[in-house]
Image (cartoon, rainbow, N blue to C red):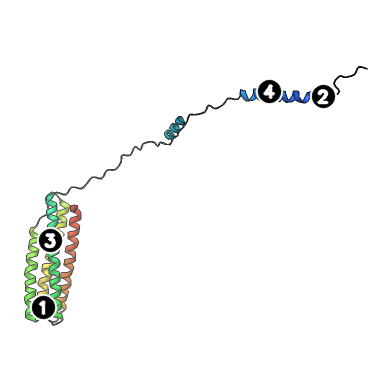
Amino acid sequence: MARNPDPKPGRWILPLIIVGMVGFTYLFTNSIDTVPAVPDNEASSSSSTTSTSEPSDTPAETTVPVVVSPEVQAYAAGLDGFDLSLADLGIRMVTVNAAWDGRTATYSDTKTALETLVADTTAFADQVAAGTPPAADANLALEHEKIVTAATAAKTAAENVLDGLVNSEGSADRLAALDAFNSSVTNFTDAVAAAKAVAGV
């Protein structure tokens, strides 16, 4: 019987298998398409382009300043002057009646003070009625009519306060007329504010 020169012939099988697996793996990995690397500058450009939003079709709102004519400004300044004048008349009216009710003023002094207030309130109402708003503004003309109405109401109330002192027994008529006068002052102030709002000042 011939002797086998290699007593362990199977020991070459394992290295051959390993070599075959390595070669197969190499061929397999080379056959796969690799993704090309993207340069940093291209990547940043792509990122910025993607994140940019579409421009809006809606135009940006612009604030247009309201231009008030000199005539309207002068009219508004006149209304402020009238408002201060009537407020002063209101203070005087309350002071005179409080002095009479507290008996710190005589009847003669109270009557004279009220007669002066009636004259001053009448002159005030006439001045308000003579004033006119700028032309070509129907809304402002309507508000001015409310101002004139409040001024006329103040004049009438002042006359009734004097009449209540002179011709009425007790103080009910005079005090009711005083309340009406105070209400007319408030109404006048509200009408002035409304007219200025319409005028845009």
- Residue 64: x and y, percent? 23, 45
Would you say 123 lies left or right of 17 here? left
Is the residue under label 3 in contact with that under label 1 (CB below 8 Å)? Answer: no
Point out the tag, 4 or 2, that comes first from the N-terminus: 2
Q: Real-space Cα distance between discs 1 and 2?
A: 142 Å
Would you say 136 lies left or right of 60 here? left
Q: Which quadrant would the C terminus be assigned to in this image?
A: bottom left
Point out the tag, 4 or 1, that comes first from the N-terminus: 4
Point out the tag, 1 or 2, that comes first from the N-terminus: 2
Q: Is residue 70 visible?
A: yes
- Residue 54: x and y, percent? 39, 36
Is the residue under label 2 in contact with that under label 4 (CB below 8 Å)? Answer: no
Circle 1: residue type: Leu
Is the residue under label 2 in contact with that under label 1 (CB below 8 Å)? Answer: no
Is the residue under label 2 in contact with that under label 3 (CB below 8 Å)? Answer: no
| Element under disc 1 | helix
* Figure check: 67 above or below 154: above
Point out the tag, 4 or 3, that comes first from the N-terminus: 4
Residue name at image x 68 percent, y 23 percent: 23
Marks 4, 3: nearer the viewer: 4
| Element under disc 3 | helix
Give the numbered dot on residue 10: 2
Q: Is residue 173 visible?
A: no
Point out the tag, 3 or 2, that comes first from the N-terminus: 2
Q: Which quadrant would the N terminus be assigned to in this image?
A: top right
The residue that mark 1 highlights is: 165
The residue that mark 4 highlights is: 23
| Element under disc 4 | helix
Circle 4: residue type: Gly
